[in-house]
Image (cartoon, rainbow, N blue to C red):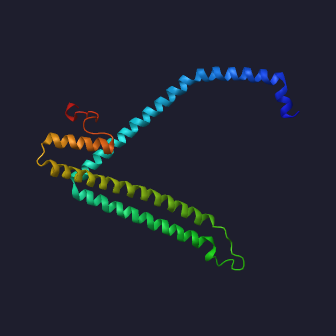
Amino acid sequence: MVWQDIISTPLFWIVSTIGTVVLSVLANLLTPHVSAFITRNLQARQSGLREKQITRRDQVITLQANVPRRTSAKLDAIFKLLLAMVLILMCLFLLQLGSGGLQLKSVAAPSPEVPIPILLLVLFALLFALVALKFGLDDMSLAITADRREKAGDDFLIRHGSASADEMKRFEDEWDLRTFGVNSLNLPALPNKNSS
């Protein structure tokens, strides 16, 4: 039986109509549960994002207050970035070395295949290089953001002369809200350490 014959039968249309109604009812019954599940996951994700924003803001404020630590963070970031670049170059070298250029065992018929141990070593080193690259970029981003926050505060003081502590706090809160999405006004209350 050809599909044109199947479509032309009345049984096909009856089953299609009943199937459509059943699927529509099931979809309407499942929609609230799926919606609640998605909402719960989004709220959990947003609270996790907020915690990351608060942590990042605290790290930047700590680096801004401590210039030697900020310089050390920049140097650590540069080291991690250089390490990642060296590892990537070594991976490329090992891949070229293992792919056939120096295989002396079979000079008559060199194999274009990369030996599995070399490939695993290259993949492991690439993974390590990517992790070092990410950590280096994160450290450098924190240090540069601390520099930008300090420069913005200095520029504010230059423009407004001797600003009061409240004006400076208001400016820092606005800058933090633009940069991090949180500021000291909308942070959760810290637990009192003396109450324990």
Left or right, 112 with reference to 82: right
Q: Up-down: is 103 above or below 74?
A: below
| Residue drawn at the location 32% of the way across and 41% of the way down | 54
Q: Residue furthest front?
A: 159
Quadrant location of the N terminus? top right
In front of the other: 106 or 41:
41
| Residue drawn at the location 22% of the way across and 35% of the way down | 193
In front of the other: 148 or 53:
148
Q: Up-down: is 119 above or below 23?
A: below
Q: How many marks?
A: 0
Q: Quadrant of residue 78?
A: bottom left
Q: Up-down: is 2 above or below 153?
A: above
Left or right, 58 with reference to 9: left
| Residue drawn at the location 64% of the way across and 76% of the way down | 103
Q: Up-down: is 75 above or below 52?
A: below
In front of the other: 155 or 53:
155
Quadrant location of the C terminus? top left
- Which percent across, then down, holds residue 57? 30, 45
Left or right, 8 with reference to 64: right
Q: Quadrant of residue 48?
A: top left
In front of the other: 104 or 8:
8
Q: Residue furthest right?
A: 1
- Which percent across, then down, holds residue 7? 82, 29
- Which percent across, then down, holds residue 12? 80, 25
- Which percent across, then down, holds residue 22? 68, 20
